[in-house]
Image: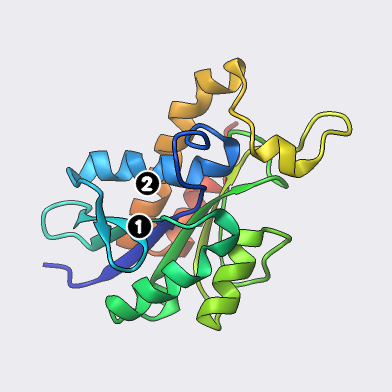
């Protein structure tokens, strides 16, 4: 049995008013992962909803977490989760929306800055480390002169919603492959453009 554990955090804002926003795509991916591993989210004392299970029988253990805080205050719950499970930030995968990637594309990386993403900024500040893996889910740039903050706090368009289930499945596949085969193998798969 694989004793590896990964903390997988899906960023977003709490409550039904935000549930379908572009900014909550990280939490949407976690819902897909929880469904796959047959786990149910439960409230935990780290100010997060947590679901746990294995990617496959004998596979790595995934601790899926959705902070109960707003996006910009994600760091406190993430730091508390790492401490609670005695995990190093190198065992953390953060799934989040990314404006600089076109909709329906993924990019995976380890480390780096926050790129203006306030959720990442708060996690880096609270954990004292940027050395975690990011699954960056492309939501695209806002049209025209619409402010980015307004764009990410709106629901996906009807056209985007037709493709969204595939994007969420791809992002969940990426998390599972990182946990099983490592980041490089997942990058080779998900960074290769279809021909």
- Mark number, residue 65: 1
The quadrant holding residue 36 is top left
> Few, some or many C-alpha atoms within 10 Å of disc 2 (few <14, some 14-19, many ≥20)?
many
Q: Which structural element holds mark 1?
A: strand
Residue found 24% across the figure and 71% down from its top = 4
Q: CA distance from mark 2 to mark 1?
A: 8 Å
Could you tell me which quadrant the C terminus lies in?
top right
Q: Mark 2 or 1 closer to N-term?
A: 2
Residue 12 lies, with reference to residue 110, above or below; the image says: above
Lateral position of residue 121 relative to residue 30, left or right: right
Residue found 18% across the figure and 72% down from its top = 3
Residue 130 in view in this figure: no
Tell me residue 97's x, y (percent): 59, 47
Tell me residue 148's x, y (percent): 76, 42
Of residues 125 and 45, which is closer to you in this image?
45
The quadrant holding residue 9 is bottom left
| Number of numbered tags placed on the structure image | 2
Residue 187 lies, with reference to residue 106, above or below; the image says: below
- Mark number, residue 160: none
């Amino acid at each position: 049995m694989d004793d590896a554990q990964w903390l997988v955090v899906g960023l977003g804002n709490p409550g039904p008013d935000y549930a379908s926003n572009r900014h909550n795509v990280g939490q949407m991916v976690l819902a897909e992962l929880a469904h796959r591993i047959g786990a149910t989210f439960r409230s935990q004392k780290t100010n997060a909803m947590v679901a746990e299970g294995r990617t496959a029988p004998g596979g790595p253990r995934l601790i899926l977490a959705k902070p109960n805080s707003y996006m910009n205050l994600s760091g406190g719950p993430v730091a508390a989760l790492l401490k609670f499970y005695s995990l190093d930030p190198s065992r953390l995968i953060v799934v989040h929306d990314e404006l600089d990637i076109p909709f329906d594309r993924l990019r995976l990386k380890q480390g780096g800055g926050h790129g203006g993403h306030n959720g990442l900024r708060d996690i880096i500040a609270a954990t004292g480390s940027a050395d975690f893996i990011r699954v960056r889910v492309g939501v695209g740039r806002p049209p025209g002169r619409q402010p980015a903050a307004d764009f990410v706090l709106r629901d996906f368009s009807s056209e985007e919603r037709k493709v969204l289930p595939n994007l969420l499945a791809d992002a969940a596949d990426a998390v599972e492959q990182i946990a099983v085969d490592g980041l490089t193998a997942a990058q080779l798969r998900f960074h290769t453009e279809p021909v």
